[in-house]
Image (spheres, helix red, strand yellow):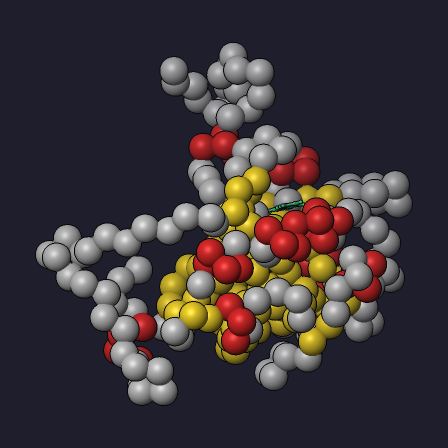
Amino acid sequence: MFYEPKNDDHGLPYNPFKACVVPRPIGWITSLSYDGIVNLAPFSISNQLSYDPPFVFFSGSGTSDEADSEPRRKDSVVNAEDTGEFVYNMATYGLREQVNLSSKHVPKDVDELAMCGLTPAPCNIVKCPRVAESPVSLECKHHATLSLPSNRTMGVHHVVIGEVVGIHINDNALTDGLVDWIKIRPLARMGYMDYTSVTEVFTMKGPKGEEFSPGKIGESSKSKLWDKV
Ligand SMILES: Cc1cc2nc3c(=O)[nH]c(=O)nc-3n(C[C@H](O)[C@H](O)[C@H](O)COP(=O)(O)O)c2cc1C
């Protein structure tokens, strides 16, 4: 089949687009409002962008509630811009219920970390807390926001790009010094109401037969960090 998104004439029972770019990692974004209230929300349109220095992004659509006469930017977007900071926490299968709950639209003065029964952990560089229960948290400084146009009023997306200035990895998430995905089961979005999580990993050599060769724990391995994307 083929269809042009502008015509929306796929003839399928549900728009397939989101189901076609999968699995999407879920950036679980903590941010602080201008008044210091903690905000937490999941964004599946999110990923790494580069690695030296590392940049990540999340993309928020428009939103509105009864008080709004027209769509506004999501709180995570506003907070990242107002404070210049946010934290990209890893969502995991074990935290899936809290991830889902944190997507609830609530008034700006609600501490969503507390609402989800989660623990704020201090960051080292940014003022915003991270999610203590998450195995990986990336402290980010807001770099830029790119706005993408849309055919729908709510569809305008604000792509928030942050430079990663600090990285927390829970020691329990490491096995022999490597991030152990089977242990932490990163959560990802498919399409529709479906999710997946990492339960299987396989290894391939590089195209020239290159083997993975990590250094020893404690030894500087800067050059080994970025062998392959
Ligand atoms: C798993 C999951 C992924 C989501 N991904 C996105 C996304 O990529 N972009 C978006 O605008 N909303 C996304 N949402 C909805 C937001 O999390 C939701 O609108 C939230 O209330 C935004 O909060 P905020 O206004 O506090 O930033 C997602 C929801 C869930 C459950």
Residue 172 image offset from top left, x and y in percent:
53, 71
Q: Return the residue nearer the eye: 191 or 148.
A: 191
**Residue drawn at (62%, 38%) of the image:** 155
Position of residue 11 relative to residue 82, above or below, is above
Q: Residue at x 75, y 64 (%)?
A: 118
Camera sees residue 4: yes
> Residue 193: horizontal and vertical position, in percent?
62, 33
- The image quadrant that residue 127 belongs to is bottom right
Number of marks in the rendered image: 0
Residue at image location 63% in from the left, 71% down from the top: 85
Taking the image as shown, residue 176 lies to the left or right of residue 213, namely right
* Observer-nearest of 62 and 96: 96
Instruction: State the residue in front, 159 or 25.
Output: 25
* Quadrant assignment for the C terminus: bottom left
Q: Is residue 206 above or below residue 79?
A: above
Q: Residue at x 67, y 71 (%)?
A: 132
Choose between 212 and 160: the one closer to the eye.
Answer: 212
The N terminus, quarter of image: top left
In the shown orientation, is residue 43 left or right of residue 114?
A: left
Q: In the rendered view, would you say 1 is above or below 53?
A: above
Please indicate, yes or no, whether residue 46 appears anywhere in the rendered image. no
Give the quarter of the image for residue 81. Answer: bottom right
What x and y, as percent, mark residue 74?
A: 71, 52
Image quarter of residue 120: bottom right
Residue reaching furthest top?
11
